[in-house]
Amino acid sequence: MKEDLKIFIDIVEKLLKDEISNPVAKPIAVDHIYEEIDIRLGDEGTVDEEFVATLSKLVLNTPKTASNLFFNQLFGGRRGKAVLGDLLAVVLNNSMYTYKVGGPQIIIEKEIIRNLAKKIGYHGESVDGTMAPGGSMTNLMGLLMARDKKDPNAKYDGISKKLIVYTSKESHYSTPKNVAFAGMGRNNIRFIDTDEQGRMLMMDLREKIEEDIANGCTPCMVNATTGTTVLCAFDPLREIGEICKEFDMWFHIDGALGGSVIFSKKYRYLADGSELSDSFSVNAHKLFSTPLSASFIIVKEKKRLYDSFSNDASYLYQTGENDYNPGKISLQCGRRNDALKFWTLWKSIGTSGLESIIDHQFDTAAKARGYVADHLDYTLYNAVDSISICFNYKNIDPKVICNELYDEGKLMVGYGSFNGQEFIRLVTVNGNIDFADLQNFFNIIERSY
Ligand code: ABU
């Protein structure tokens, strides 16, 4: 182990040095990858020197998602204290299903959940939550609780009614996948129209619910989004909450991307009404740049978690209270410790430090939007508070710009679309970048075209 730790440190030092001079790994064409790197597994092991050389080459040729030129997806950057926590979680190698096996790590997860719940606006003893491997899976958990509340026998006999799920046209692609997994059927989603800023339109929501009731269907859940994938738009939670109450529907908030605004006094207004929801998901690996993945789901009534996810297993639950055996409220059995990395970050910088991270990202995005708006060669497509800056440059096809800059190893950014308009989607999820890095991003585009 000591020998391997030394190899680890050597390779990480090489990577950190390389990230400065080569912030974008030149992509290797997938049909040449075996020629470039000795990936093939064989009957015989490799000797140490060759093994280390191959491992170093592999690491240095992997896309550099922590560099200040990575804007391609909704994660990025690296925070030392969070990495430290995750490395320790790997070395400890606990599974997070029982207190007997997880010990204080279980309490660390509970402490985070308790504090997140307060920020959402859930209070009292009935609140609980858990983690799952990614925002799609925490959304699935919200959906399964909604299904089981509306159709309690579904988990024994299968679904007995036509349960309908409402989500905006701009919401994450996990919803259609999840309703299929849940046996509810992709045809039983209603995609709600959005306004010009990409926010769910209440009039369309109400009309679709009333139409479904008239047709004998059962409205089950609204999946609202706090930070949509492309525009990072924020649905009007308070109004959605009121509609859910009126029609007795589960209210889930997909806050995977933007849910972290609950930490910011300045941007909290974007999640106004969050306390009306039944469940709320948020990813620390997005705006807080912890290592992937750190996805939480917080639930107002813990009974719902038990109803949907518990199952006796005498070989597993042998000690203690339910509250500290989170396997009883998990999607999984074996579950890695994704909590420690967020706890080490939170413990080291405090809640005020988390607030500063969120403010910095939104403020930096606002400056970037200002830059785009002020320069005639650019067209800006979204102008409200958000960490996405959606733009085009000199009317050049955004696919061409994104793909060429990637192929040339200059920077990594992706494109998106809204209302039929395609554009480049720049995101400020990496809290280590500041406006100078974005200025550099724009300069690269301007020099190239
Ligand atoms: N959670 C989905 C993120 C995908 C994207 O970066 O667009």
Image: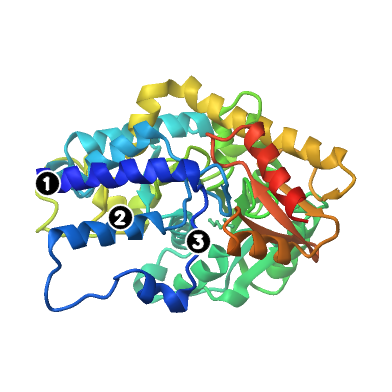
Neighbour class for label 1 at 10 Å: few (<14), some, many (≥20)? few
Is there any visible trace of residue 211 in the rendered image? yes
**Which of the pair 172/243 is nearer the observer?**
172
Q: Say which label, 2 or 1, has the lower sequence index.
A: 1
Q: State the CA–CA distance, disc 2 to disc 1.
A: 15 Å
* Residue at the disc numbered 1: 3
Q: Is residue 243 above or below residue 366?
A: below
Q: Percent from the top left, x then y, of residue 4?
A: 15, 48
For numbered disc 1, what is the local secondary structure?
Answer: helix
Is there any visible trace of residue 183 in the rendered image? no
Q: Say which label, 3 or 1, has the lower sequence index.
A: 1
Neighbour class for label 2 at 10 Å: few (<14), some, many (≥20)? some
* Residue at the disc numbered 3: 150
Q: Quadrant of the C terminus?
A: bottom right
**Which of the pair 200/14 is nearer the observer?**
14
Q: Percent from the top left, x then y, of residue 317?
A: 14, 51
Count of picture labels: 3
Q: Nearer the viewer, mark 2 or mark 3?
A: 2
Labelled disc at residue 176: none
Amino acid carrying mark 2 in the image: Ser
Q: Percent from the top left, x then y, of residue 103?
A: 16, 37
* Image quadrant assignment for residue 331: bottom left
Amino acid carrying mark 1 in the image: Glu
User: Which residue does the image show at 72% across and 44% down from the upper left?
Assistant: 442
Compared across the picture, whether 268 is left or right of 99 comes to right
Compared across the picture, whether 296 is left or right of 424 comes to left
Labelled disc at residue 56: 2
